[in-house]
Image: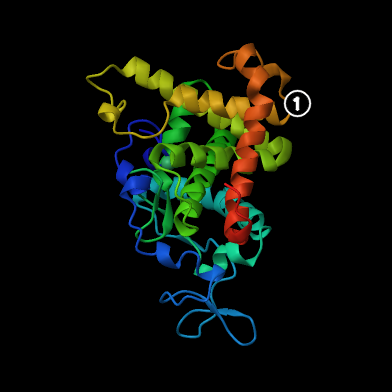
Amino acid sequence: MRRWGSGRSGTVLYGRARAGARLRAGLACALLTLSAAACGPSATSSASGAPEDDKGRPTPRTGFPIRYEPPSAPDRANAAFLRGRRVLEQTSAAVDSFVDSFGPAVRLGRTGGVAVVARSCGGEGSAYDPGARRVEICYDDVAQERALFEGAGVRPADDEVAAVLAETFFHEAGHALADVLGLDLGDRAEEDAADQFAALMLIRGGAAGERQLRVAAREYELSAAGDAGRGPAEGPADEGGRDEHSSDLVRATNHLCYLYGADPARNAGLRGKGLLTSERAGRCGEEWRGVREAWQKRLASVAAPSDRSD
Ligand SMILES: [Zn+2]
């Protein structure tokens, strides 16, 4: 079992993270900071300029308020690990800071934010739930990822588990941004954009983030190998093509390509080895620039729609 909602192939609760299944009721209000149009119980500005909700309460400053639900008994150690590593605090702060840099119109805290809920999911998998406007990160993902890496001989796998959960959060945050900011990308394109957002956020984290992105790529590779060895009768495999994510191997290769494209010197060892062919590597600088600029353009278009050029 893998982190279904974050789009590993075989997504059981795929619909929860799926762009096409999203409830868009809140979208009309998503751009409320762009216009004076009234749109219900969302943040408005008080005379003092401080954001308030419709009852005059201050809206949260953070775009991603985090809540840890009590874990089920089997998840106690997993929950302690997730809290102890502060994965959600660090990743959500990184997204907040990146998004805030585009200006007040994009600041998620002004729209009430996106809740981050850590909980026992019983294998459902981490996901973004647009109806509740929340990212759910599963304690059980910790055990699943640990088993995957330990099965590949990585012990201890603490850093690997933390890296994959960081990438999972960034992927779901990409869905959350698309939803809250009304970025209509189409189902498959949104999945790719969410992966690219995860790569962007990790690469922005410098050498440490790049290491985590390599681990996430490795995880996709291990997942693909697991699916190949499992056989169709046991699979969850691809669920008859319902999954709108790219295949695990494609996702792994894309991550490696962005890494190489972002810093060919530091990631020279990736070129021509394993999944990243020399031919593809030759295009990765351009691919990476495209990925980075696409997200910058999306966020900038919300910040200043009149300047929108795409
Ligand atoms: Zn996804």
Quadrant position of ligand 1 = top left
Q: Name which quarter of the figure residue 191 lies in.
A: top left
Q: Position of residue 40 (x, y in %)?
A: 40, 76
77 vs 284: above or below: below
Q: Name which quarter of the figure residue 274 lies in.
A: top right
Q: Which residue is farthest left?
A: 233
- Which amino acid type is marked by label 1? Arg
Residue 79 vs residue 119, the one in the foreground: 119
Residue 36 vs residue 246, the one in the foreground: 36
Is residue 242 left or right of 219 when viewed as pictured?
A: left
Q: Name which quarter of the figure residue 288 lies in.
A: top right
40 vs 204: above or below: below
For the N terminus, give its image quadrant: top left
Is residue 2 left or right of 291 when viewed as pictured?
A: left
Q: Position of residue 154 (x, y in %)?
A: 54, 24
The reply to whether residue 116 is visible in this rendering is no
Q: How many marks?
A: 1
The reply to whether residue 310 is visible in this rendering is yes
Is residue 4 left or right of 272 when viewed as pictured?
A: left
Is residue 293 left or right of 217 when viewed as pictured?
A: right
Q: Which residue is farthest right?
A: 265
Q: Position of residue 194 (x, y in %)?
A: 50, 42
The residue that disc 1 covers is 266
For the point 51% across and 53% down, the residue is: 177
For the point 49% across and 79% down, the residue is: 53
Question: Does label 1 point to a residue whose CB lies under 8 Å from ligand 1?
Answer: no
For the point 58% across and 59% down, the residue is: 305
Number of other residues with Cα within 10 Å of mark 1, as a class: few under 14, some 14 to 19, many 20 or more: few
Residue 291 vs residue 34, the one in the foreground: 34
User: Tag 1, which secondary structure?
Assistant: loop
